[in-house]
Amino acid sequence: MSTPQLPDSLLTELLDWDESSHREHFDAMDRLFESLSTAEKIIALARTWWADADHNVQALGFDLLAVQALDFAWHVPPLIEAANALDLDTVHEDVRWSAAHALAAICDDERVLSPLLRFAGDLDPDVRWQVAYGIPAGIDPLPEDAVQVLLKLMHDPDAQVRDWATMALGSRGDNDSPEIRDAFVERLQDPEADTAGEAAVALAVRRDLRILPTLKRVLATPNVGNLYVEAAAELGDPQLLPLLQKLKADGWQDDEPRPHVLDQALNACASGRPLLA
């Protein structure tokens, strides 16, 4: 199979992008993907780009396989092969980002987990974020190596990395141990509000009563975030009912993007049956 030949003007367009034109770049990659008539041609072009001496071109090979990652499975083995072949200590950060991004885009295939975890120690927080964000949703519970990676990323200097790592591990209630619970307790003090809220939900899901004092304190504030209300629904403790009733009476739901969580919390705490029951 010969490699598809692209006009120089198209290659120039594909290479000319930055963070501000992210959407335009991947829209262009999507159009190119659609224009190639067979899977063999797509893989051939990706392999040609991966072999190029220019790191910008190398990155395009990963970008090409990222644009429709949810619709195909045939591209997963060559993508994993290419990602695993990268020397992460020497390859350019743009290639590392594109490789991690392409792996993270495949959210429903457990084969990408191990290759993705390789990028967890990257110097670039945008690459580490791809790891926290891209853990395949269908793997539940997570294997121990993934758990340890997420526990480390929960202490990341970057707030977005901590947030997604906390959510990725917190949402998997079958991953439960004293080490994991203690890590969530520590994240309750996180300066990033969403991270602290995700930790609260994680502890409630695991029925860890150390979350109760935090919920009593936070639910007493009028601008409490919906993650804490969700945590109350998961815990289902009747002690929280008066605080939730006050939020209801004060119109907390009026400006909330997820107003239904308050009704769920009220029902759970009134009945003493958390959502997990």
Image (cartoon, rainbow, N blue to C red):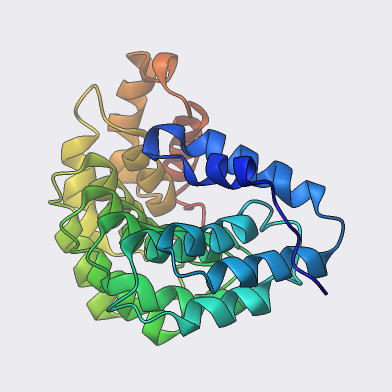
> In this image, 241 relative to 143: left or right?
left
* Residue lying at 27% horizontally and 79% vertically, measured from the top left: 89
- Residue extending farthest to the front is 8
Quarter of the rendering containing residue 244: top left
User: Is 259 situated above or below 81?
Assistant: above
Position of residue 75 measured from the top left corner of the image (x, y, whole percent): 70, 70
Q: Position of residue 168 (x, y in %)?
A: 41, 61
Q: Residue at x 47, y 38 (%)?
A: 22
- In the rendered view, would you say 120 is above or below 13? below
Query: Which of 58 and 237 lies nearest the eye of the viewer?
Result: 58
Q: Quadrant of the N terminus?
A: bottom right
Q: Answer with the quarter of the image where residue 93 lies.
A: bottom left
Q: Is residue 141 visible?
A: no
User: x, y percentage for residue 78?
Assistant: 65, 77
Residue 163 lies, with reference to residue 139, above or below; the image says above
Residue at 36 percent across and 72 percent down: it is 119
Using the image, determine if residue 4 lies above or below residue 74: above
Which residue shows up at 46% across the image and 40% down it?
16
* Residue 252 rendering spot, x and y as whole percentages: 36, 19
Is residue 144 or residue 173 the one in the foreground? 144
Q: Nearer the viewer, residue 62 or 133?
A: 62
123 relative to 173 in the view: left or right: left
User: Residue farthest to the right?
Assistant: 37
Q: Which quadrant of the view contains residue 117? A: bottom left
Question: Between 166 and 11, which is closer to the camera in this rendering?
Answer: 11
